[in-house]
Image (spheres, rainbow, N blue to C red):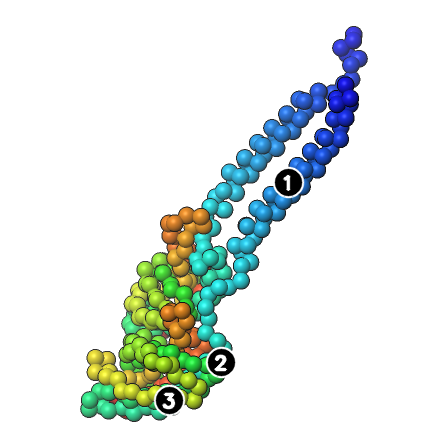
């Protein structure tokens, strides 16, 4: 009877232990969840890779040299080396990305032959890829710039 | 007995210390995280007032050389320039593509100051002909070439001139 009438809650020590325990458990969960984003931050010249992408300056042009054969001209105008190029091929209802290991030093220009099925694709987006460092680590990793920093080219007939 | 009664004050002080300590720790963490995104650009850039023009050009089709005179029309010193050429034309005779063949990378000793001109001849025999010339100036800062992407100048060459 005495036990039923007792309306006291759990002891303050238990509640504190529970509170601290839940807080620690939640912190570990959030840390493990965000670790993937935080550890994969790529930097170059002490800046985030996306900021470096904004400073890139390059020109591209595409010329047809035969059925489904094209020559892609790229000139790196800026002061940031381009490690590779992602060629996003766009057609009706489909797109595909190919990575071309075309390295362009500062001020360098190159001409690259590419094959594209004109019947399938009608335009491409040339997206630069830069080489950055994984934040807090020494290993380097390529970073494909967001598509908005790419150059869209219509395939000539 | 007296000490036991006065413990409430210490606990309150501890709470404040913990709160302030936590706030400072979180601030440092957030600062270090955000600093990475908002840090101002440290990459060296060419000043906006850099400008170079192709004052004149002459081709010698026999020896396959092109003589180009360049003038610094800007407000700043130029330490050198890249000369690239294009040798391809489309069906109408217009240059096709970009000038991708590097003819020379010239470093001007003592620099090319505003108003100064420089003239030189370059051999283009390995490219057969020249239909377009592109010049990109650069400045040397801390021993590194800083390319002036906004000062790139292109000149279409009459196809009959540099065959």
Secondary structure type for disc 1: helix
Say left or right for B99 vs A56. Answer: left
Give the CA separation, mark 1 to mark 3: 64 Å
Q: Residues within 10 Å of mark 1 (few under 14, many from 20)?
A: few
Secondary structure type for disc 2: loop
Quadrant including the N terminus of chain A: top right
Residue placed most toward the observer, B30 or A111? B30
Q: Of tags 1 and 2, which is closer to the observer?
A: 1
Q: Position of residue B8 (x, y in %)?
A: 76, 28
* In the depicted structure, whether residue A12 falls above or below residue B48: above
Residue placed most toward the observer, B113 or A92? B113
Quadrant including the C terminus of chain A: bottom left
Q: Residues within 10 Å of mark 3 (few under 14, many from 20)?
A: some
| Residue of label 2 | B49
Residue plotted at (75% across, 23% down)? B3
* In the depicted structure, whether residue A117 falls above or below residue A59: above
| Residue of label 3 | B117
* In the depicted structure, whether residue A32 falls above or below residue B69: above
- Determine if marks 1 and 2 fall on one subunit: yes
Work out whether mark 2 precedes mark 3 in sequence or the reverse, and give the earlier one. 2
| Residue of label 1 | B21
Work out whether mark 1 precedes mark 2 in sequence or the reverse, and give the earlier one. 1
Q: Position of residue B82 (x, y in %)?
A: 34, 77
Residue plotted at (29% across, 73% down)? A65
Q: To which quarter of the image does residue B160 belong? A: bottom left
Give the CA separation, mark 2 to mark 3: 17 Å
Residue B132 in sight here = yes
Work out whether mark 1 precedes mark 3 in sequence or the reverse, and give the earlier one. 1
Q: To which quarter of the image does residue B153 belong? A: bottom left
């Amino acid at each position: 009877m005495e036990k039923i009438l007792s309306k006291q809650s759990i002891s303050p020590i238990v509640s504190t232990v529970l509170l601290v325990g839940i807080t620690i458990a939640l912190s570990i969960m959030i840390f493990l969840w965000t670790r993937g984003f935080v550890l994969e931050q790529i930097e170059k010249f002490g800046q985030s890779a996306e900021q470096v992408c904004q400073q890139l300056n390059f020109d591209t042009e595409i010329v047809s040299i035969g059925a489904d054969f094209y020559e892609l001209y790229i000139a790196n105008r800026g002061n940031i080396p381009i490690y590779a190029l992602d060629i996003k091929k766009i057609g009706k209802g489909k797109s595909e990305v190919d990575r071309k290991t075309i390295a362009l030093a500062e001020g360098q220009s190159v001409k690259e032959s590419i094959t594209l099925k004109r019947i399938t694709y009608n335009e491409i987006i040339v997206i630069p890829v830069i080489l950055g460092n994984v934040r807090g680590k020494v290993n380097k990793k390529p970073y494909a710039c967001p598509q908005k920093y790419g150059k869209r080219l219509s395939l000539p007939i | 007995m007296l000490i036991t009664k006065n413990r409430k004050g210490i606990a309150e002080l501890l709470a404040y210390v913990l709160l302030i300590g936590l706030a400072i720790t979180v601030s440092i963490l957030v600062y270090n995280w955000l600093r990475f995104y908002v840090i101002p650009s440290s990459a060296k850039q060419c000043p906006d007032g850099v400008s170079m023009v192709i004052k004149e050009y002459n081709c010698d089709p026999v020896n396959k050389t092109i003589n180009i005179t360049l003038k610094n029309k800007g407000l700043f010193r130029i330490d050198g320039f890249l000369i690239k050429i294009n040798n391809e034309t489309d069906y109408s005779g217009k240059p096709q593509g970009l000038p991708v063949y590097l003819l020379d990378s010239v470093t001007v000793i003592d620099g090319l100051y505003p108003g100064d001109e420089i003239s030189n001849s370059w051999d283009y025999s390995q490219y057969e002909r020249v239909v377009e010339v592109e010049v990109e100036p650069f400045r040397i800062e801390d021993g590194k070439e800083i390319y002036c992407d906004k000062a790139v100048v292109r000149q279409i060459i009459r196809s009959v001139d540099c065959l």
